[in-house]
Image (spheres, rainbow, N blue to C red):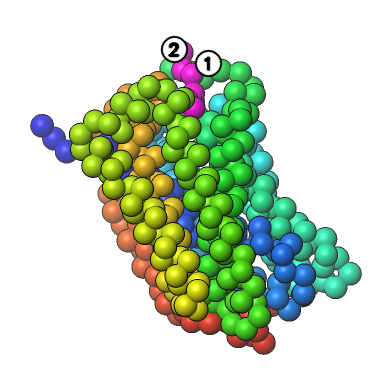
Amino acid sequence: MGIDLAFIWAFLIAFAVLAYVVMDGFDLGIGILFPFFREKHDRDTMMNTVAPVWDGNETWLVLGGGGLMAVFPLAYATVLPALYVPLIAMLLGLIFRGVAFEYRWRTTRWLPVWDWGFSLGSMVAAFSQGIALGALIEGIPVADRAYAGGWWNWLTPFSVATGISLVIGYALLGATWLVMKTTGDLAARARDIARPATYLTLLGMGVFSLWTPLIGAHYLGRWLAFPAVIFSVLVPLLVLTCVTLILSGLNRLKDVQPFLAALALFVLGFIGIGISFYPFIVPPSLTIQEAAAPRESLAFLLVGAAVLIPIILTYTAYAYWVFRGKVRPEEGYH
């Protein structure tokens, strides 16, 4: 029995998606929180906290999407037509947000327009990602190795609820990021926002966890099977621990603890989704093995990934290390 290259690639793509969520999540959260901060100097400082890293964070999205197309072409060919609308909306939101990021520094007259563009682009991108996730969890119908659903299958109460929950979760990441990276009134207001965002994120995770088994019996069965049942027993305790760490860190004026605990919440949720999906890559129709490219292609591409992923991790870690610490309001992106 040889090495299961398809499983390795599924893990790598899942890792790329998780890296994107935790890194670009707080980035999108900054834009989502823009309407809560009216002063220009506050918004300038908020954008300066992510200016050195925001475009690099999206590298992981490209890696995940490109890897899916190259390694699991059948999954790509079924997921894309099923989620055309939310995925296109996400890309337009990211594009408009990126343009607004550059243009708002170079205008005075149109500054309010680009501020709203940055905020709306962030909200649309986050909401669309949640919609796509919810639709994927509900299942994509496949017949004769092709998408067999309708144009609006992605729009359901569950997917909308997932989209709203992800927006709130990203707002939590953004608020705790500001607590870690800023000082004074801006950090204090971010703490005030992070507290209700924590409770709302916890509520969203609870609703999501209770709703998902109702979608299909296979989800409930997978969570009750060994060894997943161990995680299903531990996850409520782990989630409550993360929430406690966030709130205690906010109350004790800790800078880093709330952000790391908020990231841990997302990691727990992502692991739960992975357990729910396995062994499917497009539930409930395509398994990892069924959707994978030929073994020779997987092996060839894995060589490139073995070189590329450490490079991305290295320069990402270096960028975060160089720009560690608090942001000075008088310095920043121009």
Q: Nearer the viewer, residue 188 or 318?
A: 188
- In the rendered image, residue 121 lying in the magenta stretch gets the answer no
Q: Given the current orientation, which residue lies at the most extreme right position?
A: 109
Q: Which is more toward the observer, 278 or 167?
A: 167
Above or below, 137 relative to 126: above
Q: For the residue labelled by badge 1, is the local secondary structure a helix, a strand or a loop?
A: loop
Against 17, is 328 above or below?
below
Residue at horizontal 46 percent and vertical 57 percent from the top: 22
- Residue situated in front as seen by the camera: 328 or 235: 235
Which picture quadrant has residue 91?
top right
Q: Looking at the rendered structure, which numbered label has been put on residue 3?
A: none
- Measuring from the top left, give residue 26's x and y in whole percent: 54, 61
Where is 142 relative to 158, above or below?
A: above
Image quadrant holding the C terminus, namely: bottom right
Image height of 61 relative to 163, above or below? below
In magenta stretch: residue 139: yes
Q: Which residue is mark 2?
A: 144
Q: Which residues are magenta?
A: 138-144
Cα separation between marks 2 and 1: 9 Å
Q: Is residue 87 visible?
A: no
- CB of mark 2 within 8 Å of CB of mark 1? yes
Image coords of residue 55 (percent x, y): 56, 62
**What label sits on residue 148 in the rendered view?**
1
Callout 2 amino acid: Asp
Q: Position of residue 325 (x, y in %)?
A: 48, 81
Q: Is residue 53 left or right of residue 260?
A: right
Quarter that holds the N terminus: top left
Foreground tag (2 vs 1): 1
Q: Secondary structure at mark 2?
A: loop
Query: Residue 145 vs residue 331: left or right?
Result: left
